[in-house]
Each structure stands twice: as C-alpha cells, then as structure tokens.
Image (tube, rainbow, N blue to C red):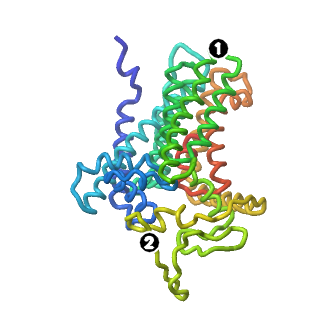
Amino acid sequence: MPDRRASQPHLPLHLLLTAVVLGCAALEGWFGRPELFGDDISYLDVTNMIRLGNWKAALNPLWSLGYPLLLAAVRPIFPSGIHGELIAVFALNMVICLATWLAFLWFLRTAVQFVPPRSEAAPSVSPFLLTIAACVFLVAEVGYGRVSSIGPDQLVACLFFAASALLLHLLKRPRTSTTVALAVTLGIGFIVKAIFLPLAVIVIATALLVLRGRRPRRPVLLLSPVFLVFVIAYGAALSWSLGRLSFRESGPLNYAYHVNQLPHWMGWQGGPPQLGTPITPVHLLRENPAVFGFGEPLRVTYPPQYNLLYWYDGYRDFISPRNAIRAIAVNLHELEKILHENWPFTLGLILAFALLTYTASVPHPSRPLRWVERRLWPLYVPSLLGIALYLQVHLQARYIAASSQSSR
C-alpha cells in the first residue's frame, strides 16, 4: 500500500492553515457586519420569495438565484426571526468559505503539477508556497471578499477556483468526464452570477487554443453545448418571470450606471436626454429635501432596490468612447489603490508567482524564461482577462478576490 504521508504531503501544515483560515473567517463573519446594505437586503428578499414559492418574484435579473437558493435550503434549520436569519447566513457563509479554501488548495496543487514537465514523482506544494498562498487567500477572501457579506461573491470565488483546477486537468489530459464537470461548474457559476458568462467564454477559448490539433478533440468540443444548456434554461426562466424575452439584463444596466453615468439606486426622474425617461419612476413628493413615494405588487423590504428594472424601464443604452475611456481610467486608479494600500497582498502575489515560475524552470535550467512563460500562460491569462472585464465597467476589491489569487 502507498505511504499515506507521500499521498498527503505536509498534512499537519494543511490542517493548521485550515484552522487559521476558518478561525479568521469566523471572527470576520460574526463581527464584520455592522449594518445591512442594499445588496444584503435584496438577497434576503430573494430568499424569502423562494421560501414562499413566488418564483416570478425570485427570478430577478439583478439579483442572481444561486446564493439565495442555498440560503433558502438551510434557513428552516435555524430559528425564525431576524436573529435566526443572520445565524443562518453566518453558518452558510462559513460552509462556503471552507469549500472555497478547499477549492483553492485543489487549484494550487493542480497548478504546481501542471507547471513542471512530466516526471516520475508528482510534485507537491512546498510549505513555503502553501503558507504564502494561505496568507493571500486570507487577505482576499476574508479581507476583500468579506465572509460577513450576504451575497454570491464568496461562492463565485469557490466556483472559479474549481473551474480553474478543472481547466488545468483538461489541458493536461482531455477527458469527457473532466469536460462535463468543467462545463457544469461554469453553468452553475452563471446561475450564481452573470460574470460567469464572459468568464466561461475565456475558459473555453483557452482550452481550444491549448488543445488545438491535439487528439482527442471530442471532449473539448462538449464544453460549449453543456454550458449553453444552463444559459438557455436560466434565460428561459428569466423571460418567463419578466413576461418578455430576456437573457441577462444586469450587465447593460450596470454599464449604464457606471459607464454612462445613469443616476442610480434611488429617485431617477429622467434625463439627461440621451439616457431617456423612466416609464414607471418613483414619485417625487418633495424636492428639498428629496422625498419619494413608491409602491408595486412585490411585497419586499425596499422595492426601489429590489426590482431596479421596473423603476429604470425606459433608460436608453448607448456607447460612448469617451465614457468608456473614463470608466477604464477610474477603475485602473481603483485597482492601483487596492494593490498599493494592501502591499503585503501584492507582494505575496508576486512572490508566489515568482516561486511557481522558478519551479517550472528548475527541471530545464537551460531553457529561457520565455519558454517558461509560454507554458504558464493558461494559469494567469484567464484570470487577468477576468479582471479586465471588470475594468471596463466597475471594479471593487471584492470582485477581484478570486481572479487576483488565480493570476499568481
């Protein structure tokens, strides 16, 4: 029988780091929510709509269904009332955090095995790299991502790490089972958050580029059809809920908010002229101070935040190169501020990537760094392109937690 220590290298360190990660996550998850924000309340409302069986209200183009489905599933275990609701959120977020950490370790191990050429002994993650990676994970997923938040960001990170690990497995050895698992992971990610649609395109394109001309090609060709099953099914459900053909409308609306400067979150009465006029605006009852009145069939905590498409129906989409350039400049500045203000995190990323590059060059020291970079690009290019997607519209630290870790 194989030596268990060889099959599970550095197990005590893994257990120690897991305990540290979960301990820090529990502290932030319990004490890190001083108040509930608009997004938090909306996801709680979607959860309540699911529990009531009101699927027309729950299928909201702005607030994805994945996280509320999980919360609705675990909610009956805990006491009724707001206190029980917050305990349910804490318990679910801790489970997601553990799953995210395990997916991250899986991706890290897969990345190390993917980098060096084939050898008799499978490489393992060194204690030094594992410790750096744990520090990076803590800053990103507990600091940036916030375990205390009510929403899908942590779940997005978990699925992104899993998809990245499956992609590397597929690139190393194409198999039908791996292809289906990757496509299903991307499909579930799309239900969790719309950003997985362009991310899936990047992942699929990476697989096709790396495996072009290699046999067998049939497993890779299954990626798009299996993923499209999820896209079409969810698009059909949203269309049924809205009563019109709909694909995913959160992207265009966020583009209007953050790029074309559409006044958002409350009180838009129309204008400037190029943005159009709302068909069903909130009623302006008083101008100074601004007081609004609103009402709609949905009985939720705060209707203007929950059903933004209803209140903003009538806005106009348009493309402005000037606005697009300004948005990219603003988001680049935000990225620079994130990396500068959290320089230990940035240093950890650089150090981890340098160590990974060194590991790749050790088996063949005569090969130049250019050869190493050509071999490594599937590790970091998908993540960098994912960050580039956010740069075009709106960037926050919590959005890039998963991508920044994978790009190392």
- Which labelled disc corresponds to residue 377? none
Badge 2 or badge 1: first in the primary sequence:
1
Secondary-structure class at tag 2: loop
At x 58% / y 73%, what residue is drawn?
Answer: 268
Secondary-structure class at tag 1: loop
What is the crowding at mark 1: few (fewer than 14 residues within 10 Å), some, or many (at least 20)? few
Foreground residue among 269 and 70:
269
Q: Amino acid at mark 2?
A: Gly
Foreground residue among 176 and 1:
176
Relative to residue 265, is residue 15 depicted above or below?
above
How many angstroms separate mark 2 from mark 1 (CA)? 59 Å
| In contact (CB < 8 Å): disc 2 and disc 1 | no
| The N terminus, quarter of image | top left
- Residue 83, x across and y down, in percent: 26, 61
Furthest residue toward bottom: 288
Q: Which residue is mark 2?
A: 295
Furthest residue toward top: 1
| The C terminus, quarter of image | top right
At x 42% / y 68%, what residue is drawn?
Answer: 302
Q: Which residue is mark 1?
A: 215
Quarter of the image where one finds residue 105: top left
- Residue 118, x across and y down, in percent: 59, 16
At x 64% / y 43%, what residue is drawn?
Answer: 384
Q: Amino acid at mark 1?
A: Arg
What is the crowding at mark 2: few (fewer than 14 residues within 10 Å), some, or many (at least 20)? few
At x 46% / y 61%, what residue is drawn?
Answer: 39
- Residue 164, x across and y down, in percent: 54, 34
Foreground residue among 195 and 169:
195
Left or right relative to 145: residue 12: left
Relative to residue 329, is residue 157 depicted above or below?
above
